[in-house]
Image (spheres, grey):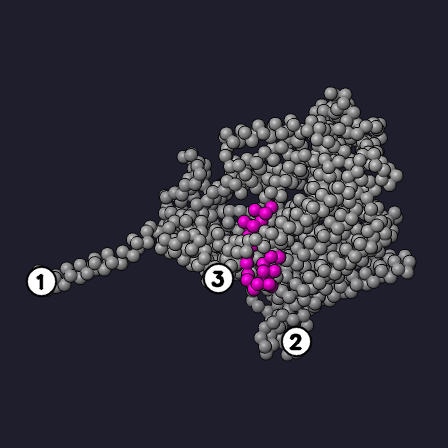
Amino acid sequence: MIANFGYGVLFITFLVTLYSVSAAIYGERKQIPAMVESARRAMLLTWPLLTLTAGVLIYLLTHNHYEVQFVYEVTSRSMPTYLKVTAWWGGQAGSLLFWSWLMSAFASLVTLRKWDRDREFLPWVIVVACVTMAFFIGINVFFENPFAQLYQTGAGIAAHTFKPANGILFTPQDGRGLNPLLRHPGMIIHPPMLYLGFVSFVIPFAFAFAALITGRTDDRWIRLTRRWALWAWLFLSFGLVLGSRWAYDVLGWGGFWGWDPVEIAALMPWLTGTAFLHSVMIQEKRGMLKHWNMLLVILTYDLVIFGTFLTRSGILSSVHAFAQSAIGPFFFGFIGLTFIASVALLIYRWDSLKSETEMTSLLSREALFLLNNLLFMSILVVCFWGVIFPLISELFTGQKVTVGPPFYERATAPLFASLMLLMGVAPLSAWGHSTIKTLGRAIWKPIIGAAAITALLFVTYTHKVGALLGFFLIALVILVTIYEYLRGAYARQRSQDENIFTALWTLTGRNRRRYGGYIIHISMMLMAIGILGIESFQVETQGRIGVGESLNLSNYTVTYRELASWDDEPKGVNYTRAVVDIYRNGIYLGELHPRRDYYYDSQQAMTIPGERATLRDDLYVLLIDWEPASTTGATFKVFVNPLVNWLWLGSFIFLAGIIIAAWPEEEMERVAVPVRRTIPQTSAAD
Amino acid sequence: MTSSSRFTFYALLLTAFLATLSTRPASAQGPTPTDDEVNRVAKQLYCPVCESTPLDVCPTEACRQWRDLIRTMLAEGKSDSEIKQYFVEHYGARVLAEPPNRLVAYLVPAVVILLGAFLLFRGFQVWIKPSTTKAGGVSARQEAKPAQDPYVARLEEELKKRN
């Protein structure tokens, strides 16, 4: 009964979205503002309706209604209540509903703003938001109903939306329980973050689409959605980082990024989104690249849908693809339709999107930003090709193949290195005009500094050429960014008679996007140190050792002390935990507890590493196997992951940077300053 | 020597002989490969059952048996490439971390990227005009002036003073 109520509300929401789309188009075509207003109110209704639907689902999840198939598949009696709630996005049907719920929240937020100046955008923003919502809710209504119930008929037990003839409701005693991998805190937060990023990118697309269809193709749509795009980027980036941390903590393979298709599915809209965030600045500053920005936002939107499709269709099953179903063709059709419609509109408006200015120098900021875009798009091409290549191969040759990390690493490493080089050079170039002379004058000091750091690393740390090149680029970007920062601070210190710290603080406050961006650049480089460290210097060993025996790796010694195994009956988990003593160069550092958790309900195990994290390296010990009877011998796998913790440190600084960049800049708009009539020669950042 | 003790003596002799025989093939295989040696090969292979999971980390029982197979083959003196070939023959090319036809895999993105670079280069040729060129009634150089960015103007002014 409750499940039927939930399905009923879901179905009504589906109808409301369809009404909203129809009313918005009709109102706009016939110029009836009341119809558009009706469409807006209908859209505002979707959020309370979907919240009610979600409330019903959460009630079913937390009250052990195992007659509902979704509840049966993702929860069990032994799970704590908070996990039963988060199981909402632990399975396919629920996560699609979660997508729609977030989308309705964001769409409502957008429509609640004042529309006085942009009234003509409103109907089309409603159309895009509601078509997207209708698509996802439609999938829930017709294919992946989270409220479908289990019925026993002559043909056996199966899930049905409506009670079949002669069917008897079947209620299992207990559910199968959530996949243990999804019970980790990282995995509880990671999907919402990723989905928040996905959904927020729909808003810039909605405005771009509205701009195209109304012909108001100035950069108003960009100004309106700039902050949305930044927040979307923040969520997506954090979703990626959290996913990496989760992989590092629970997948038990000593790494954080396996170039799995689903990881790449989340990376692709991030790549176009990052390119977009850079290239919109060119449009804002110079009135150029209007076509390109439109194309980027269209691509980002469709890659967002493609990302959800990859995770959810099961067409490219991977460790992340926990659910498979027949919804693939619908995703594919929707992506094709929206892409073709958007590109057709773009072509229709091509002439009105002409650049207002010309480029003057190959070394200007805008030229370097274009190169940056080319590199991001090149990485996208590699990723997209890698993801679809197995399908193409199977389609044309019948041969199933794997495209694994060696392909991606080989193909993207030079592209990432070039991006870092650009990140070092671009902040020193000026909008409109730069020459080798002006650029050279600004960059020689950071280059010498970076070379000195690289030489020091050559003497003290590594002789690997690839790693040294990476460190040189990282040092260059960090030094250039600090140099730019200090130049601004000194200027301010002098003009405002402030101390250097106040100057740094107010400098950042006065131009948040630029200096937030610089903090993001530095954080990216810290993350790059972590990635370079684990990619270049990771070492591992595995062996079976008895109590008191040791494994040696790098300067570390791991000595097996004891092993214990016990049941936690309320939780339905069996823990097997080893205690190992850790030494570095013979000095005792402490003990680690690698363990294996076996979940009885889902009959799956999770390998939790024992980790000792420092900025120098991460000692990562896994319990692979053991002798249950005697507990005298156990197999351990030990990794030393140098510098990897810089990756996590960088992600926190990244968060700070993006919050600064996305914060409203009220003061700048008020301050009037005298203007000097010369071209900046060394730097004109932002 | 009694008949029973003689029987015991011959039985022990036979056992010792058989034991020698039975250990001979093992000694021909050399020492048992270490876990690290097995993982070195397994790392280059993907689980034939669970997609996107390298064989060295796959926790399933099937993969454990495949790792044991790698150990046996290494003990028999098989090379890494022979072992990989064995897996390809039995389970298909998907066990390899990269497609066997690497040329196609690498060529297509390379061509697309080069095409993009070429288009950008052509774009630069068309877009980049001498700095005095008028565009839309506003000179490009004027557009580049710091007048567009009061903040930059002030910054440059201060730097000039400092220098």
What residue is pinned by disc 2? A164
Circle 2 Cα neighbour tier, 10 Å, few/some/many (<14 / 14–19 / ≥20): some
Q: Main secondary structure of the magenta part?
A: helix
- Which dot, 1 or 2, sits closer to the camera? 1
What residue is pinned by disc 3? B91
Specify the quadrant of the image occupied by residue A400.
Answer: bottom right
Do the numbered discs 1 and 2 sit on residues whose CB atoms are within 8 Å?
A: no
Q: Secondary structure at mark 1?
A: loop
Q: Residue at x 66, y 59 (%)?
A: A309
Circle 1 Cα neighbour tier, 10 Å, few/some/many (<14 / 14–19 / ≥20): few
Do the numbered discs 3 and 1 sit on residues whose CB atoms are within 8 Å?
A: no
Q: Residue at x 52, y 31 (%)?
A: A458
Q: Which numbered marker is on residue A675?
A: none
| Between discs 3 and 1, the one toward the N terminus | 1
What residue is pinned by disc 1? B2
Label 3 chain ID = B
